[in-house]
């Protein structure tokens, strides 16, 4: 398991001997990379052979810094799946040591991994954090042949599925918009393609991903429930490589290579679905002319400028094109861009500066005779982010920095060529969000690690714009801010704290507390993601959402770290949660805030995780017992009710087995309690129409959801420059008809509950290949 | 705002259809068929009184019906509430105690006709409980034109009724519209001129069934007050959206937890034969 930003505890002898002050120190720093493709390795470790408890880990940019009392040592550089490199400090002339680790061959893998003391999960201070292993992901069954990181995280404890086949997810009882999803530091507002059946993340382009379930370090902020930090690959800086895959409904292609060997590289990946090709088989003309596809492009380039600077430019562009004949069309997509500079000030001080742009927009076009309308909406942020890592010594590490973001929301511009329809634009919303943070990681007595910090966040309501005051009868006052004028500012200190206590070599107990705030809010009255859901900034009426979460956990590894067990509990409160008045008009409403209700939430649960990390048979069992509730004065007389993100039980079993080195099979079984919903408790007649009479909010539940998926991956005969494999996946093997929605229908004097289900059994086949362009002989 | 509502309705339904299309494309099967009736256990509330009362400026008598709600899985027989005291009064001091013409159906007695501009009050006393409501009848409405239009929607020509009528450009006004198609009553729909900057408003009027050439269509448009508008607007939101949305009961303008509504509407009607 990969670990980041962690310094192994210093040996107790040093702590107590006072040698620190008496003796000169030696600081070694550098970057650790993959020798084959030049990708920097995050969470690779440097350990001292003579002092096995001293060490350092590389940060997200592959940088490490290690300070030791002067002396002769043997340094060991290691990373999962790579051969160790031993280096004697006598042989070091330069204190900058850049290392290239060679991936170990398959045969050696087991030996290597067991040599690696993979116990960071026990020792570090991380509570509710998962570093996703993207290689494992490649073996899991997939829907429609597309590997999807957002569906894989739904198999982890505390993460709930957003619905059948959906990439949306809920973390610890929070809503989907309370997840901060970062792609190379840029927030992605709508992570779903094709109404959520696919995520925007093309797995080929990804390097690593980390999920923080609420207890994030101070460097992250802006959402209540979680941070999913996804990093794109840098690209191979040795060889030109072309790889890709062909599936039943989508194909992918990736090209990477050096800009200049060892100095810089680029990577471009593209993906397009062609589900709409099947529509051409229809005998209905409108179906044939319908559009139904998405494409996305990830691109990244990096270049080292001298020894101290490393510049990165990365971008994402994705677009969905959906349309029914010529009568209805919706296009939507995300664009993100990040320009980043790593600068090494000294062997102890590392900095990263990022300029970030992100944009989500949709366009709806409706054209009927006598009715023609276009609607456009945009949410766009510009950010500047600065992070410093200061490696004080091997026991103390500081991180500090700031983030400033300008938010712009264009809620809707309605235009029409039709003279009978009034064109208009809803007022744009602007906001300015700032945060500064500092955190200190310290290790004490070789048994206790503490990470504490604070994030000071502000949100300023910014002009130009109209701001309204409301009472029960409607709008009471309108005030206007001009460009450059500021309205109300909200200031929120967000303390963060986590502590681990290693009371035994392989066991630890951890506690954590954190406060998070959120200033962008998604208005949706549906649990399934809809590309046209409206985003709203904090205003004079809408307060920043605030959450406080306390977590505690017990972690143990056994049989030389072959097995991991963790048990975590959490309790979270949420303030300033948003719901709507009955019959709220959210679409095209200038004073949409008048339709909102404000309340609070609470969520608590216990998460159990058991994992076998190596051997022919690997996998995990994850079980969550939880509850998530909301309270609004105007709903159900102010009683607590279940949130739509409540599932009592959530169980995932993941098993992978290497039959031979070339054939791998895997299985996933999921079970969860049906979502809380409001069902009729009666019916009545009004003007001849039968109307359901609804009971209390979310007092009922959908039927339980369960599903088995199977997958087999065959590695085909490889050639010198050419490797390829074939993946067969079967989704929902026993064809369970899980309810996607339930309608209450009365026809011919009979009232029924009718479920809509999306998928029964779906097989898919994907062929993946990788071609390394042979080098010209010099 | 009419067209925004159309946009909402039309944007929701095609999205569902796109999801269906997508699945059809994947599975190489025809559209639809992915539904089944399920055996879902539902709890049942105590029977609740349902009150439906209408007063218009067209000659009476006006009817108030009282019935009880039923368990959801029961057949559609809704017990009438007999023996209640039902009174309609107005702000000019007139009072009429309604007469039960058949079980649960109460009709006005003294032959009054509703007058636009007046506020009407309903009082229902039954089973020891009193339910009250009041509704103002706005200025009279006139219909400019009624037409049947058709659009190509997903390969099929769909016909619908469009009714245009004059409206104010500076006052917010609310309307309820419904139709009789060969005497079959449609659902009730509501609209407002809130986002309309013209002197006429076009409303799409619901019909009970698909319109066929030769159908006799009677279009009714009533000016109503905000309470009635909110009732039908929330009723419609709760019945037309999919069940993934948290549904709720419409906000009634009747007190004491009664279901239903009391509406004083200034009525205009027009008849056409579908071309």
Image (cartoon, coloured by chain):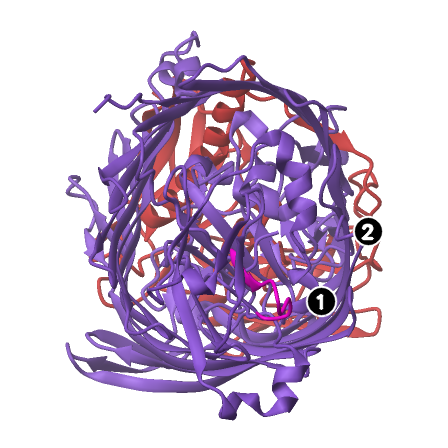
Chain colours: A purple, B red
Task: Please tell me which of labels 2 and 1 falls first in the chain.
Answer: 2
Q: What is the number of callouts on the image? A: 2
Q: Residue A641 has which mark? A: 1
How far, Cα to Cα, is label 2 from label 1?
44 Å
Res A559 label:
2
Specify the subunit that label 2 lies on.
A
Q: In this view, does A221 lie to the left or right of A216?
A: left
A312 in relation to A144, above or below: below
Helix, strand or loop status at disc 2: loop
Query: Residue at the spot x=60%, y=59% of the render?
Result: B250
* Residue A251 figure quarter: top left
Query: From where the camera sits, is residue A303 visible?
Result: yes
Q: Is residue A53 magenta?
A: yes
The chain ID associated with circle 1 is A
Decide which of A410, A424 is in the foreground and name it: A410
Q: Does residue A43 lie above or below B152 as drawn?
A: below
Q: Where in the figure is residue B224, as x and y percent of width and height? A: 44, 60
- For the residue carrying disc 2, how many other residues have a C-alpha within 10 Å: few (<14), some (14-19), or many (20+)? few
Helix, strand or loop at mark 1: strand
Q: Does the magenta stretch include residue A293?
A: no
Residue A687 location (% of width, % of height): 61, 46
Answer left or right for A754 relative to A201. right
Q: Where's residue A714, x and y in %?
A: 61, 18
User: Disc 2 vs disc 1: which is toward the camera?
Assistant: 2
Q: What stretch is highlighted in magenta?
A: A44-54
Magenta span main SS: loop
Query: Which residue corresponds to the image point at 24% horizontal and 60% vertical from the top-left?
Result: A307
Q: Name the residue located 44 percent from the left edge and 22 percent from the top edge.
A: A245
């Amino acid at each position: 398991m990969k670990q980041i930003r962690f310094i192994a505890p210093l040996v107790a002898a040093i702590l107590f001997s006072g040698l620190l002050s008496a003796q000169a120190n030696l600081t070694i720093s550098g970057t650790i990379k993959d020798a084959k493709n030049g990708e920097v390795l995050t969470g690779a470790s440097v350990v001292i052979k003579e002092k096995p408890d001293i060490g350092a880990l590389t940060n997200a940019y592959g940088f490490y810094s290690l300070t030791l009392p002067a002396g002769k040592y043997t340094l060991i550089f290691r990373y999962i799946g790579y051969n160790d490199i031993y280096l004697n400090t006598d042989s070091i002339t330069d204190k900058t040591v850049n290392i290239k680790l060679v991936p170990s061959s398959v045969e050696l893998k087991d030996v290597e991994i067991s040599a690696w003391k993979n116990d960071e999960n026990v020792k570090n201070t991380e509570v509710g954090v998962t570093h996703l292993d993207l290689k494992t992901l490649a073996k899991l069954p997939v829907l429609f042949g597309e590997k999807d990181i957002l569906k894989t995280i739904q198999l982890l404890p505390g993460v709930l599925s957003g619905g059948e086949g959906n990439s949306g997810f809920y973390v610890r009882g929070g809503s989907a918009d309370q997840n901060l999803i970062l792609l190379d530091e840029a927030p992605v507002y709508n992570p779903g393609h094709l109404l959520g059946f696919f995520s925007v993340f093309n797995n080929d382009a990804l390097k690593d991903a980390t999920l923080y379930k609420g207890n994030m370090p101070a460097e992250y902020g802006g959402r209540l429930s979680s941070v999913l930090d996804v990093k794109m690959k840098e690209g191979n800086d040795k060889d030109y490589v072309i790889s890709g895959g062909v599936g039943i409904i989508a194909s992918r292609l990736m090209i990477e290579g050096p800009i200049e060997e060892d100095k810089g590289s680029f990577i471009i990946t593209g993906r397009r679905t062609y589900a709409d090709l099947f529509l051409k088989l229809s005998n209905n003309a409108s179906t044939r002319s319908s559009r139904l596809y998405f494409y996305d492009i990830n691109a990244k380039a990096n270049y080292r400028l001298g020894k101290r600077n490393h510049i990165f430019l990365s971008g994402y562009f994705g677009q969905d094109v959906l349309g029914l004949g010529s009568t209805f069309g919706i296009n939507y997509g995300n664009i993100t861009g990040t320009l980043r500079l790593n600068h090494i000030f000294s062997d102890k001080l590392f900095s990263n500066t990022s300029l970030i742009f992100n944009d989500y927009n949709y366009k709806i076009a409706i054209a009927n005779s006598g009715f023609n309308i276009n609607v456009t909406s945009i949410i766009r942020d510009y950010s500047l982010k600065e992070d410093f890592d200061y490696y004080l010594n091997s026991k103390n590490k500081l991180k500090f920095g700031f983030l400033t973001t300008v938010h712009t929301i264009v809620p809707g511009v309605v235009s029409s060529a039709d003279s009978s329809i009034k064109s208009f634009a809803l007022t744009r919303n602007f906001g300015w969000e700032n945060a500064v943070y500092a955190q200190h990681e310290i290790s004490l007595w070789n048994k206790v690690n503490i990470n504490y910090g604070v994030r000071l966040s502000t949100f300023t309501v910014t002009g130009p714009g109209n701001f309204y005051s409301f009472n029960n009868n409607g709008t009471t006052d309108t005030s206007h801010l001009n460009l450059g004028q500021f309205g109300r500012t909200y200031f929120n200190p967000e303390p963060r704290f986590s502590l681990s206590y290693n009371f035994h070599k392989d066991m630890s107990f951890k506690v954590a507390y954190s406060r998070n705030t959120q200033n962008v809010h998604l208005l949706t009255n549906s649990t399934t993601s809809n590309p046209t859901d409206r985003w709203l900034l904090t205003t004079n009426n809408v307060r920043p959402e605030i959450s406080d979460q306390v977590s505690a956990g017990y972690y143990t590894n056994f049989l030389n770290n072959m097995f991991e067990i963790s048990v975590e509990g959490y309790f979270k409160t949420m303030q300033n949660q948003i719901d709507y008045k009955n019959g709220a008009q959210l679409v095209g409403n200038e004073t949409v805030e008048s339709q909102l209700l404000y309340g609070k939430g609470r969520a608590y649960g216990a998460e159990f995780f058991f994992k076998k990390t190596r051997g022919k048979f690997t996998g995990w069992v994850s079980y969550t017992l939880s509850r998530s509730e909301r309270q609004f004065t105007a709903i159900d007389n102010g009683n607590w009710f279940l949130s739509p993100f409540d599932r009592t039980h959530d169980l995932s079993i993941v098993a992978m087995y290497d039959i031979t080195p070339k054939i791998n099979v895997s299985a996933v079984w999921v079970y969860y309690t049906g979502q809380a919903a409001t069902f009729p408790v009666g019916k009545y007649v009004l003007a001849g129409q039968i109307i359901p009479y609804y009971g209390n909010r979310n007092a009922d539940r959908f039927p339980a959801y369960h599903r088995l998926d199977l997958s087999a991956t065959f590695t085909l005969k490889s050639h010198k420059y050419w490797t390829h494999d074939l993946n067969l996946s079967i989704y929902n093997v026993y064809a369970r008809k899980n309810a996607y929605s339930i309608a209450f229908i009365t026809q011919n004097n009979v009232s029924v509950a009718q479920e809509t289900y999306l998928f029964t059994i779906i097989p898919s086949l994907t062929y993946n290949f990788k071609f390394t362009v042979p080098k010209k002989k010099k | 705002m009419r067209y925004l509502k159309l946009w909402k309705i039309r944007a929701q339904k095609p999205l569902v259809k796109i999801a269906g299309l997508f699945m059809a494309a994947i599975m190489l099967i025809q559209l639809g068929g992915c539904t089944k009736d399920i055996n879902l256990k539902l709890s049942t509330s105590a029977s609740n009184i349902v009150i439906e009362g209408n007063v218009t400026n067209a000659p009476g008598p006006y009817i108030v019906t009282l019935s009880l709600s039923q368990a959801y899985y029961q057949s559609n027989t809704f017990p009438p509430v007999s023996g209640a005291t039902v009174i309609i009064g107005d702000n000019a001091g007139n009072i009429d105690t309604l007469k039960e013409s058949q079980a649960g159906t109460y009709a006005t007695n003294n032959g009054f006709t509703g007058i636009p501009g007046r506020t009407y009050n309903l009082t229902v006393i039954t089973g020891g409980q009193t339910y009250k409501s009041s509704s103002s009848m706005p200025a009279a409405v006139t219909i400019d034109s009624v037409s049947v239009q058709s659009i190509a929607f997903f390969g099929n020509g769909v016909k619908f009724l469009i009714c245009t009528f004059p409206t104010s450009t500076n006052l917010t006004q609310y309307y309820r519209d419904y139709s009789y198609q060969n005497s079959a009553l449609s659902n009730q729909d509501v609209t407002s001129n809130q986002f309309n900057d013209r002197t006429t408003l076009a409303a799409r009027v619901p019909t009970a069934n698909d319109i066929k050439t030769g159908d006799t269509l009677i279009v009714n448009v009533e000016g109503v007050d905000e309470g009635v508008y909110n009732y039908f607007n929330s009723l419609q939101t709760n019945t037309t959206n999919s069940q993934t949305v948290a549904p709720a009961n419409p906000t009634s303008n009747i007190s004491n937890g009664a279901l239903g509504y009391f509406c004083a509407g200034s009525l205009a009607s027009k008849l056409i034969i579908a071309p």
